Structure formats: structure tokens, C-alpha cells
Image (cartoon, rainbow, N blue to C red):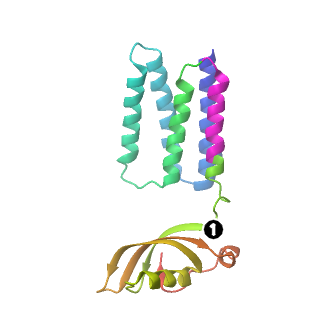
Amino acid sequence: MSQLVLFAIDICAVVLLVFGLYFPRHRRRDLVVAYLGVNIGVLAVASALSASNVGAGLGLGLALFGVLSIIRLRSTELDQHEVAYYFSALALGILGALSTTSVWLSGGLMALILVVMFLGDHRRLFRHYRHQILVLDSAITDHVALVAHLEQVLHARVHAVTVQRLDLVNETTIVDVRYALTERLTAEPGAPVAAGARR
């Protein structure tokens, strides 16, 4: 009976994770079925292993290895927050399948995962900080001048810059930049990016 309760809690938790947190915030329909499939798949495999004579640790390890290999070998790139949702869906499925004497413990751990994802992926957390790859229409070899140019173009405080490509022939610089928006630009979400950079 307690196992059925855990199954129900897991289904409610993954529905809340996907349709209450992920999709309203990021709107990627293709990952909805991925998160649901990973969760239910891990739940089914882990439940079958726990009810059989096969070593649950070995079987669960192989299942997790297979799922993580799929995540790693995807042809499309995943952002870090999307990988975090993958791991959350995995963890919810494992917690829902493991036989335990305390339903409250497993349910509490599932709730903890949801709370952490709600807070960690909240739009107001570090909302001024951005990460982008920019193509500048000039070749800048000096790091200090590059930072100053980016701060002028973005109207922001640059925290880290990595030059990915410097083309002296075509006069372009491709940079990976992490920056924080100023209050003026944050107050004007429709403000255009200044000339000199192409996103």
C-alpha cells in the first residue's frame, strides 16, 4: 500500500515539476515528454528491480548510466537548467520506486527537490545577470579594451570574458561574456542593444 502511495506522490510531483515549474518558465514542448518519460521509465525500472532477485544497486546503476548517456549524446544542446530538470525527474522517479518504511521521508525528499527547483530557477534570482555569445564587428586584441568596449555596448558591468575566436582578416571577435545589467537597462526591457555587437 505504501508503494502505491509513493507512486501517486511521484506522479503528482513530476506533473508539478513539468507543468507547474518547467513549462510555464521555459516553454520547450519537446522536453516535456522527455522529463515525463525519464521519470516514469526510471520509476518502472527501479520498481521492477526492487521486486526481483536482481541486485537493485547494479540494475539501477545501469539504468541511470543509460539515461545519463542519452542526455550526454543528444544532438541538440541542453542548457544547464534543463539538465537540472532531467536530474530532478530522475531523482523523483528513484524516490518513488524505492521501498521504504517511511512514506513521509520519501515524500519530504520529493517536496525538497521541488522547492529547490522552484527557488533555484526563479526569475528573480540573479535576474540582472546574463550570459551571451556576441560577435563584435571589430578585432580587439587587448583584454582591457575588450572589456571596456563590451561594457559600453551592453550598458552593463562585465564580470568575465572569454575570446572564442579572433579574426584579424574579417575584423571580428567572437566572445563569451558574462555580465550584469545596470538598473537603467533593467528598467527598460525593450531597450535595444547598442551598435557594435550582433547577438
Q: Position of residue 165 (x, y in %)?
A: 34, 75
Q: Is residue 194 magenta?
A: no
**Mark 1 — residue?**
128
Residue furthest front in the image: 144
- Residue 68 coordinates in the image, percent (x, y): 40, 40
162 over 144 or under it: above or below = above
Q: Nearer the viewer, residue 94 or 17?
A: 94
106 magenta-colored: yes
Disc 1 is placed on an element classified as loop
Vertical order, 145 against 177 (above or below)? below
The percent coordinates of residue 84 (x first, y second) are: 52, 47
Residue 36 in sight from this viewpoint: no
> Measuring 53% from the left and 31% from the top, which residue is drawn there?
93
Please name the predominant secondary structure of the magenta segment in the image: helix
Residue at the spot 39% in from the left edge and 24% down from the top edge: 59
Magenta residues, as a range? 101-117
Local crowd size for mark 1, using a 10 Å CA cut-off: few (<14), some (14–19), many (≥20) = some
Q: Residue furthest top?
A: 53
The amino acid on which the numbered mark 1 sits, given as a three-letter code, is His
Based on the displayed image, in which of its 4 quarters is residue 168 positioned?
bottom left
Q: Quadrant of the N terminus?
A: top right
- Vertical position of residue 176 compared to residue 166: above or below: above
- Pick whichever, 163 or 51, lies toward us: 163
The image shows a total of numbered marks equal to 1
Query: Relative to 169, is 91 on the left or the right?
Result: right
Specify the farthest residue to the left. 169
Can I make out residue 110 in this image?
yes
Q: Is residue 183 left or right of residue 170?
A: right
Provide residue 124's location: percent of width, then percent of height: 68, 60
Instruction: Identify which residue is drawn at 62% across, 33% down.
Output: 109
